[in-house]
Amino acid sequence: MRLYDTAKSAYVDFIPNDVVRIYVCGITPYDSAHLGHIFTFMTYDLLQRRLEDLGHKVEMVRNITDVDEPIYRRAQQLDIPYTELASQEIESFHSTLKTLNFRSLFAEPMASDYIDEMAEAVSKLLEEKIAYKVGRDIYFDTAKYPDFHNFSGFSERLLKGLFKLRGGDPGRVGKRQPLDFLLWKSVDDQSDPARWDSDMGHGRPGWHIECSIMSSATLGVPFDIHGGGTDLIFPHHSAEIVQSQALGFPQLANNWLHVSPLLSDGEKMSKSLGNLVFANDLLGDYEPSVIRLALMQYHHRIGGEWQPELLHDAQELLNGVRRVSTKTDKLNATNLISKIRSSLDDDINTLEVVDALKEFVRSKPGPQSTSTETLQIITKALTLIGIE
Ligand SMILES: [Zn+2]
């Protein structure tokens, strides 16, 4: 199997161990189940399915960032407790993924369950002078860790722009370097529902440290693959890497696999832009397999503009596959499964998977109704991509 590794900016031969440990940055529960997220997570679901097909046990971990500023803001707008917003969103997210036939996870850590570990880590970094205080907030001193700047391969100018765009505070007075990132935010306001007691006083962890702690706590370090959207390469994953180094783990993950965004109106789908397409809305009109097949018409490294007409194409394709499945022979079925396998092995190339299905639809019908044995091969092939 070959995968494109962001850290090496190259395809690498991925040689899986018996157990493959994967950590994917999950949702912040306030705009959860939109198609952009489904597209990202489906890539890892396909990887999981293929690895399981090869006989590996996959320990897939996808966290829930239930401690983060956007949830508090959204909960305030809605005038409900943020915990209520989070649990509603998580429930709806789970139900959507289940309907869309996602494989189950090894673990789904919630940031709020690991606050003590996060606080302890920040405390340690402070003690070792890798972190420092600005007022009562605590920042990571990136000067000592060049990988923070190097991991993405982005120019310094781009790093600065992205840092600000993605919630950083390059201009804060008192910081040693503009791109030093927040590890612990002090929260004095007693009415703030998201504050925890710690050695450093009341507050909450920064977003980046959350994933360093949740990944190492659930999988151990280094694990095999770290995933997430390309928008997480900097600063989130760059920060994770150097935090883990500072905490004594030179290598957090052996491979980095990122998924490009699905766009809507030319922009990444996001709540703030109001351009979200919800899987739940589509599920009213289309069966789950159609939605999966529509998303497979995008390559995970390219992403692209969401085109609703692809649902129609996907429905046609699925109808075709079902029609041909009733009267085909073993050779066609074997071709189908081997092409799906080799496409997934080629950096999860879903475009090739779709081609394999189209080829199957065009294949010469068998002389009689499909045998049970052949039908089992077809079912196995479709299960590999989560289609029923
Ligand atoms: Zn993360």
Image (cartoon, helix red, strand yellow):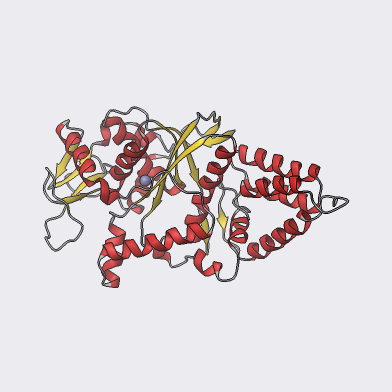
Q: Give whichever of 313, 154 is nearer the camera.
A: 313
Residue 50 placed where, x, y %?
58, 40
Specify the farthest residue to the front: 372
Name, please, the residue furthest toward the right: 367
Which of 293 and 289 lies nearest the eye of the viewer? 289
User: Where is the C terminus found, in terms of image quarters?
Assistant: bottom right
Whether residue 305 is visible to the viewer of this picture, yes or no, is: yes
Rendered position, 127 above or below 374? above
Please indicate whether residue 313 sits to the left or right of residue 176 in the image: right
- Residue at 62 percent of width and 41 percent of height: 344
| Left or right, 88 with reference to 303 | left
Residue 373 rendering spot, x and y as whole percentages: 74, 45
Number of numbered discs on residues: 0
Q: Left of 194 or right of it: where is 232?
A: right
Q: Where residue 275 appears, x then y in whole percent?
A: 47, 66
Camera-side residue: 229 or 145?
A: 229
Residue located at (52% from left, 47% from top): 45
Q: Nearer the viewer, residue 183 or 214?
A: 214
Q: Residue at x 26, y 70 (%)?
A: 80
Q: In the rendering, at what x and y percent does residue 209 appear?
A: 28, 42
Q: For the N terminus, which image quadrant?
A: top right
Residue 345, quarter of the rendered image: top right
2 to 288, vertically: above or below:
above
The quadrant in which residue 246 appears is top left
Residue 367 placement, left or right of 158: right
Taking the spot 79% from the left edge, 43% from the top edge, the residue there is: 330
Residue 268 visible to an observer of this rendering: no
